[in-house]
Image (spheres, rainbow, N blue to C red):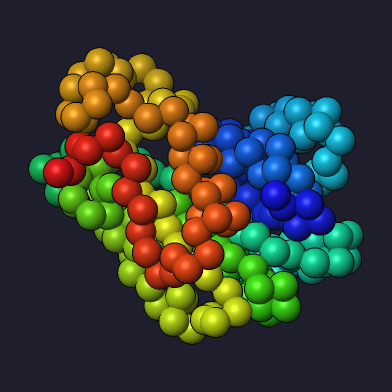
Amino acid sequence: MLQEKVALITGGGTGIGRSIALRLAKAGANIVINYSRSEKEAFDTKKEIDGMFQKCLVYRANIAQDAEVRVMVKRIINDFGRLDILINNAGMTYFIEHNDLEGLKDEHWDQIMDVNVKGMFHCCRAAAKHLKDNNGCIINIASIAGITGLGSSIAYAASKAAVINITKSLARVLAPKVRVNSIAPGVVETRWIEGQDLNKLASGTLLGRNAYPDEIADVAYALIANAKFVNGQTIVVDGGSII
């Protein structure tokens, strides 16, 4: 159980982030939900956590902006006095066919990399000292796109490959005080895939279905609470689609 622990979840109001926030709150953790644009969803998630009688605060910050991340972490320490868990879940993409090389513009690369790679690093760097103080842990939400090179766009796949690589680098740098792992989901039924053919997406898995956000949250919880000797690893949660 995670009583008295404090967890920051970026993009914590929707999808996988929301499920992780609720899962950690059920285990007794106090929760910080970060959002950039999804304000209503962030506060809806907070309301659910408040109903569990766990403390939950919501902070708006664009993680692509280092200064905003540092202010957010400072406020967390001021409000809670500690930070134990960092879940780097916030991400963005553009859906651009991989063979449309001209369609993948510099602005797409810049925005995807700024959030998915630099934003993740900003959060890790700002939180590192406080996580070390509490023998904390970091979980980065990657994607099987970072392994297969497939996905919503070439830039997105490259960004998630970078997440997996940076996870290994940070695991070395922050050891032995802080464990750093990543989770690489396959297709997860969130608003990201609204309007797509879910049956067609599910046909690529050995289990014949897509993942649900709660299943990613279960793996995150296991890495935090139980798998204390796992470090620098990427756990694939894809129903066997890349075998």
Q: As drawn, is 239 to the left or to the right of 70?
A: left
Q: Residue at x 25, y 42 (%)?
A: 151
Q: Give the image location of residue 74, x and y in percent.
A: 79, 68
Q: Residue at x 72, y 73 (%)?
A: 134
Q: Residue at x 40, y 21 (%)?
A: 194
Q: Quadrant of the C terminus?
A: top left
Q: As drawn, is 94 to the left or to the right of 153?
A: right
Q: Give the image location of residue 50, x and y in percent.
A: 83, 33
Q: Residue at x 75, y 57 (%)?
A: 6
**Vertical arrangement, residue 155 with respect to residue 49, above or below:** below
Residue 39 visible, this angle: no
**Vertical arrangement, residue 222 with respect to residue 240, above or below:** below
Q: As drawn, is 212 to the left or to the right of 195?
A: right
**Vertical arrangement, residue 19 with respect to residue 173, above or below:** above
**Vertical arrangement, residue 127 with respect to residue 14, above or below:** below
Q: As drawn, is 138 to the left or to the right of 99?
A: right
